[in-house]
Amino acid sequence: MQEIPYSKILQWYQEEYSQQQSESVYGSLKEHLIKFFKVLESCKNLTTVLELGCGDGANVIALAERGYHVTGIDIAGEEAVLYRASQKSLDTVKFITADITSYPFDKEFYDCVLCAGVFHLLNAEQIEVVARKAKRAVSQGGLICLDVATNMKRVFRDSGEEFTFTGLANWSAHQAKEFFTNLFSDWSVLDMFSFHKEADWPVKPGNYPIAPYHWSADYVCVIAKHPTA
């Protein structure tokens, strides 16, 4: 199986998130996030949200449109996020350009922390670090939503050759469920569920560092609540 350097991922997302577009490259909200948004909206007095690895801001903008004060963190995407926030007259959006694996975002507290579609791009140690920092950043009575794409398979669309990126965790669904169960053993787990997803990538033309490919994965998602004092 061909292995592609991890640095190509960074080049890919910097290209993908550099364009000021009226809509996210990810299109409409994902079904499992709509499910989480409903849980969030059912909880009263939660107003601040932190999204880790927010990309070009699909979720950030959707949350701001629902009245939340949202901070997004990613290594790229600031121009795209703030452009769309401006276009929609949203003044409750903040973007921090930083690497979530090293940036001390847990020095602040938020009513909700979201990290979706990110962990499959990290190694196991980085997942552990980010997840524990995310947990520490949630205020008492707040919510957290994390997911990880497991059993990931990537195949070049033209050649049909399978490939992977070097250094990633490449977890199985069992590993992800076990990790989330242990991580939130002292919290209230409101839901933990799995679903299958696959798609062609990229969804829009551009000058990308690798050829277009098809991917498939089994997602594991957890929604948990910080216990109150």
Image (tube, rainbow, N blue to C red):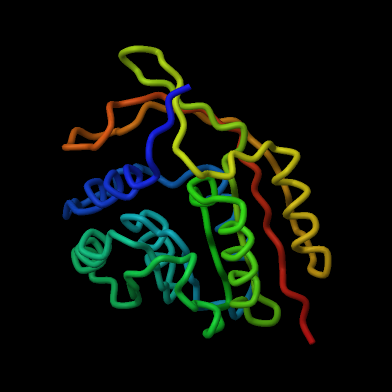
Q: Position of residue 26 (x, y in %)?
A: 35, 43
Placement of the C terminus among the 4 image quadrants: bottom right
Residue 175 is left or right of residue 8, and the answer is right
Q: Position of residue 159 (x, y in %)?
A: 34, 12
Residue at image x 48%, y 44%? 30
Residue shown at 68% from the left, 53% from the top: 222
Q: Residue 9 in the image: state x and y as whole percent.
A: 35, 44
Number of marks present in the image shown: 0
Q: Nearer the viewer, residue 22 or 209?
A: 209
Let me know if residue 38 appears in the view: no
Q: Look at the image and tell me whether residue 62 can be seen.
A: yes
Quarter holding residue 136: bottom right
Quarter location, residue 217: top right
Tell me the residue at 34%/75% (across/down): 94
Q: Who is closer to the viewer here, 22 or 11?
A: 11
Most foreground residue, 10 or 26: 10
Q: Residue furthest top?
A: 159
Q: Nearer the viewer, residue 186 or 210?
A: 210
In the rendered view, would you say 197 is above or below 148? above
Measuring from the top left, give residue 135's x and y in whole percent: 65, 71
- The residue sitting at 39% across, 44% down in the picture is 6
Classify 116 as above or below 46. Answer: above
Residue 158 located left or right of residue 33: left
Does residue 8 lie above or below 97 as drawn? above
**Residue found at the far right of this picture:** 185
